[in-house]
Image (cartoon, helix red, strand yellow):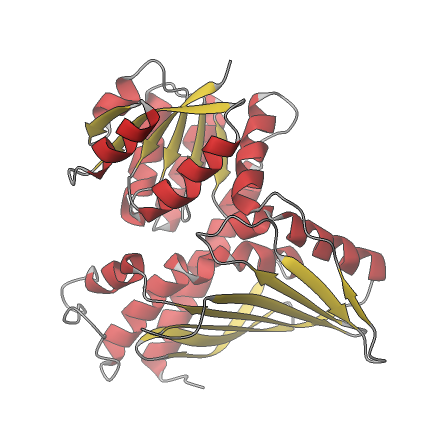
Amino acid sequence: MPSGVGVIGAGPGASALHLATLARLSDRFTVVHVSDGGGGRAEELAARLGATASTGTDELLADPRVEVVAICSPPDAHASQILAAVAAGKHAILCEKPIATSPDDAARVIDACRNAGIALVVGTNHLFDPAWGRAQHHLTAGGAPVRAISITVALPPNERYHDAVSELPPAAAPARGAPDWGDPSVAAAVLRQLTLGLAIHDLPLVRDLARRLDRVVFARPVSPIGYVIGFLAEDIAVRLTAVMVPGGADALWRIGIVTSRDLIDIEFPPAFVHVGSAAVRVRTPDGRRTSFPLTADDGYVAEWRALASILDGDAVVEYDEILADAGFAFDLADAVEAAVRAGAIA
């Protein structure tokens, strides 16, 4: 019998990513309830699925058919909604990143889930993408030390990140539209938000290779919305670059890993296109190129399969790793904010 899923949030991340993914896993999960913040989108999505629609979270969490909660709401609601799902006695939670917006809230979330024995998966789809497992295997088998990591993201404008920019504390909030990058307090606050909202997609992958953040070397905004950040982690040079340009090129999301013997290139497909895993290519100094085969599952399918494995008793929840990933992101976001305020620009 498929586990009943209640989806909190009815934006693009829920409808185009998680509902589409769950439709491919109908033997294991079935969506029975969708809620939103009052915009009416939940009713439209629920009608397509024959599910119940509601506003807020109370009705969804009280629904006895809901065993698994998918949290796809704005980040500032994640911690309270995880805690509410735990208090409601739900069996499992898949929460979009980040699990919280402060270290204290992240610790409370993990403590609550651990004490209740709740299956918890964070929606870091790149971490779960089968391509990342292949790249890790290559790195381990080769044994060559990692020298540098470069993550490049080019996206069309995304309302979620525009909303993040407009939801800064009142003292730092810019007008709707392009932030006032000339104001250091605005630039610092926006880059902190983007670190926790966009860069966080790949920080668990960075932490797989370099578990300790040493220092931020430079950080600066990129117009109209974006960043370039350079930091050292266990003496590995890491560069994060992202930009959202209206009418720009097709979406690009690429990770390059330089070792002492080769270059590993990982290219993820656009987020809303379910075409399988990322592509992995390896190049060596003598010109040899190797392309790894693609798989049908992408990271969204893989993260839901991971949750199913925990529910079935075939895997355990890595509470400490989830908390450590969150801590790494908070440390980087704080250091980026401090670097921008201090004028450490590229």
Residue at position x 64%, y 67% in the image: 234
Q: Where residue 205 sits: x, y (%)?
A: 59, 56
For residue 335, side relative to residue 28 (left or right): left
Q: Nearer the viewer, residue 165 or 333?
A: 165
For residue 135, side relative to residue 244 (left or right): right
Q: Where residue 111 sits: x, y (%)?
A: 44, 33
User: Farthest residue in the front direction?
Assistant: 48
Q: Where residue 343 sits: x, y (%)?
A: 36, 85
For residue 245, side relative to residue 130 (left or right): left
Q: Which quadrant of the structure image shows residue 145?
A: bottom right
Residue at position x 33%, y 40% in the image: 79
**Number of marks in the rendered image:** 0
The answer to whether one can see residue 95 in this image is: no
Q: Which quadrant of the structure image shows residue 45?
A: top left
Q: Which quadrant of the structure image shows residue 242?
A: bottom left
Q: The C terminus is located in which quarter?
A: bottom left
Q: Where residue 340 sits: x, y (%)?
A: 35, 78
For residue 147, side relative to residue 272 (left or right): right
The answer to whether one can see residue 259 in this image is: yes
Give above or below for 334 relative to 121: below
Residue at position x 61%, y 58% in the image: 211
Give above or below for 276 relative to 35: below
Q: Nearer the viewer, residue 16 or 4?
A: 16
